[in-house]
Amino acid sequence: MSIAESSASVEVSELTPEEATAVFDRIVRSALNLSGEQFLADFDAGKFDDVEPDAHPGLLDVLMALPLVR
Amino acid sequence: MACLGTGKVVVSPRGRADTSKTHSWSLNAGKGMVLRGQAAGSRFLASMHYRIIPTDPEKYDVEQGRWRVTTSAYLYEFRAPDNAKLWAMHWHPAGKSHATFPHLHLYTVRPDGHFVTPRQTLESAVQWCIEMGAEPQNSQWRTVLAESEGIHQLYRSWSEDPSAPTGGR
């Protein structure tokens, strides 16, 4: 195993509400091919109430991002 | 995570102070980190739901802090360069999933399987990435991971069964 000689670092960044909305929209579009707004409407209408997140590709990625906007 | 490379932990709005709701963080805003070495091009994704709660003085030393963080869900995932999922450590107790327990997905072994696990740590997921061929970016990575995981294990409120105690670190 090689080990890189680098100065890798991880910083923490807190999003603004506007940034968070944009990130959420990007995640939903990538994962479910929906807009963030459309997902939230479907979510609130109960469309995902009986959906197993592990069996619905992309859904868990979106659910993990939900606190960005809720 | 710096043992794997440079990145950013992106926290939901007011996620460093707001005690009123569940917050989330994710590695590089959900994009994950592209790995190097033999695992070059593979990605490590990590995200967590958490809440900031008052420290229970009967369980913890409040001198160490009046507030603590309790985890309410986690996702650590390894994806091949073609974006195929190879393995994932999940705990997402809310919602409709029957798998409310911490579990492991081994997608190439049994795609729909939920293999029961103890609570997994971010540090163990990072170590799994290195075992998958990711080039460590720190020569002291074993020590760094052990120290970080040790702090977590010292203060967490559960390790096997999330339903037994209330909350968790």
Image (cartoon, coloured by chain):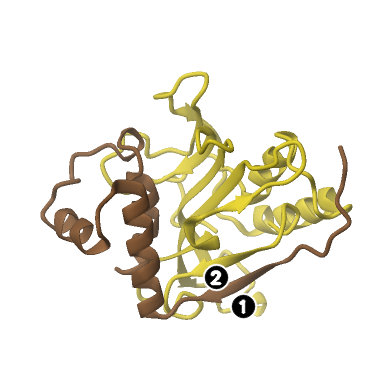
**Tag of residue A17:** none
Residue B41: x, y in percent? Answer: 64, 43
C-alpha gap between disc 1 and disc 2: 7 Å
The chain identifier of the residue carrying mark 1 reads B
Residue picked out by circle 2: B68
Q: Are marks 1 and 2 in contact (CB under 8 Å)?
A: yes
Q: Residue at x 36, y 79 (%)?
A: A17
Q: Is residue B102 above or below residue B23?
A: above
Q: Amino acid at mark 1?
A: Gly
Q: Residues within 10 Å of mark 1 (few under 14, many from 20)?
A: few
Give the colour of chain A: brown
* Secondary structure of residue under mark 1: loop
Residue B28: x, y in percent? Answer: 55, 61
Give the colour of chain B: yellow
Q: Residues within 10 Å of mark 2 (few under 14, many from 20)?
A: some
The answer to whether residue B161 shows anywhere in this view is no
Hey, which residue is sitting farthest left in the picture?
A45
* Quarter that holds the N terminus of chain B: bottom right
Q: In front: A55, or B23?
A: A55
Q: Is residue A20 above or below residue B48?
A: below
Residue picked out by circle 1: B65
